[in-house]
């Protein structure tokens, strides 16, 4: 497993990737050509992947994101060290927090 700030990246064997993940539309890259895993609402910084691949996200605020890196890649962020990821599939999980009466994605 890999963690960068409030983003957890979990390797998933190809046979264990649910069919729904492959059927989801690939998300577009940002203006810098990165796959954005999480955008900081406060700072504007992004946890993003550099390298070839696709990112797909299930609907909803807690929808699972699926990252496919056919050649590997690097997770980058302005305030964290880069993380090298080997080729394969990954489930991307945003950290959540409890506030009275609700659960929400952690704001960065």
Image: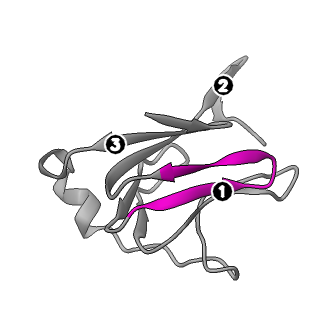
In-front residue for pair 7/75: 75
Circle 2 SS class: strand
The span from disc 3 to disc 2 (Cα, nearest Å) is: 23 Å
Of marks 3 and 2, the one in the foreground = 3
Residue drawn at (69%, 82%), measured in percent from left and top?
A: 31
Q: From the image, tell me which residue sits under label 3.
A: 11
- Residue 86 shows up from this direction: yes
Residue 73 falls within the magenta-colored stretch: yes
The span from disc 2 to disc 1 (Cα, nearest Å) is: 23 Å
Of marks 2 and 1, the one in the foreground = 1
Quadrant in which the N terminus appears: top left
Quadrant in which the C terminus appears: top right
Q: Tell me which segment is drawn in magenta.
A: 72-84
Circle 3 SS class: strand
Q: From the image, tell me which residue sits under label 2.
A: 97
Is 72 placed left or right of 38 in the picture?
Answer: left
Residue 106 image position (x, y, % from top left): 70, 35
């Amino acid at each position: 497993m890999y963690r960068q700030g409030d983003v957890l990246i979990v390797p998933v064997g190809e046979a264990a990737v649910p069919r729904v993940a492959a059927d989801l539309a690939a998300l577009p890259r940002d203006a810098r050509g990165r796959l954005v895993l999480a955008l900081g609402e406060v700072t504007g910084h992004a946890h993003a992947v550099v390298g070839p691949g696709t990112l797909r996200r299930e609907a909803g605020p807690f929808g699972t994101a699926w990252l496919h890196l056919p050649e590997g890649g690097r997770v980058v962020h302005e305030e964290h060290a880069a993380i090298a990821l080997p080729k394969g599939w990954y489930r991307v999980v945003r950290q959540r927090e409890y506030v009275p009466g609700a659960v929400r994605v952690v704001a960065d």
